[in-house]
Image (cartoon, rainbow, N blue to C red):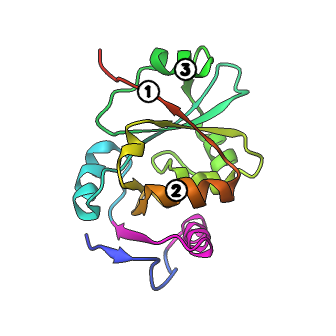
Amino acid sequence: MELFHGRPASSEGRLPREIRTYDYLDQLGIEYQRTDHEFADNMEACYEIDKVLGVVICKNLFLCNRQKTNFYLLMMPGEKKFKTKELSSQINSARLSFADAEDMLKYLDIEPGAVSIMGLMNDHENAVQLLIDEDVLKDEYVGCHPCVCTSSLKIRTQDILERFLPATGHEMKVVHLVGED
């Protein structure tokens, strides 16, 4: 894997949702580094990518309540274990579960394995609430996918919070996850 500054030189062989991500970031003047890699849809694969980017890629979970009336994108450190009960009490939503792939595509234009904060640029109705574990905000950079799981980005956390989120119209809710048994 090689580290690049900015978008690929060519869009050949890349999905439109990936190119739209680069267009969006470029339009906002957000700098980013990128690496291309094999299909990476689990944290083990992301650890190798982390070494190239020099950042820890967040674990991103797309969740919903039982009635499928509330959807959440949770960003948390990859090494933490996700405990539904721990999060449910903080957002006053009982019976959280993983949302279906169809809802992921509908709201974020992302497929399983590529869940990322970048998908919020596709949520024009603000149907998805962003939840960020407080530990993610301690890092200078965020690692994420550009709406596909064959590339990964390194973006300043400050740019995500101060430029990307306001542009998408989304606000974040900070949560505290211990992730221990």
Left or right of residue 125, residue 177 in this image: left
- Mark before the other along the chain sequence, 2 or 3: 3
Q: Quadrant of residue 28?
A: bottom right
Q: Is residue 148 visible?
A: no
Q: Amino acid at mark 1?
A: His
Quarter of the picture holding the N terminus: bottom left
Quarter of the picture holding the C terminus: top left
Label 2, secondary structure: give it: helix
Looking at the rendered structure, the number of numbered marks drawn on it comes to 3
Residue placed under numbered mark 3 in the picture: 90
Left or right of residue 100, residue 40 in this image: left
Residue placed under numbered mark 1 in the picture: 176
The magenta region covers: 14-36
Q: Amino acid at mark 3?
A: Gln
Label 1, secondary structure: give it: loop
Q: Is residue 95 above or below residue 118?
A: above
Q: Quadrant of residue 65?
A: top right
Mark on residue 160? 2
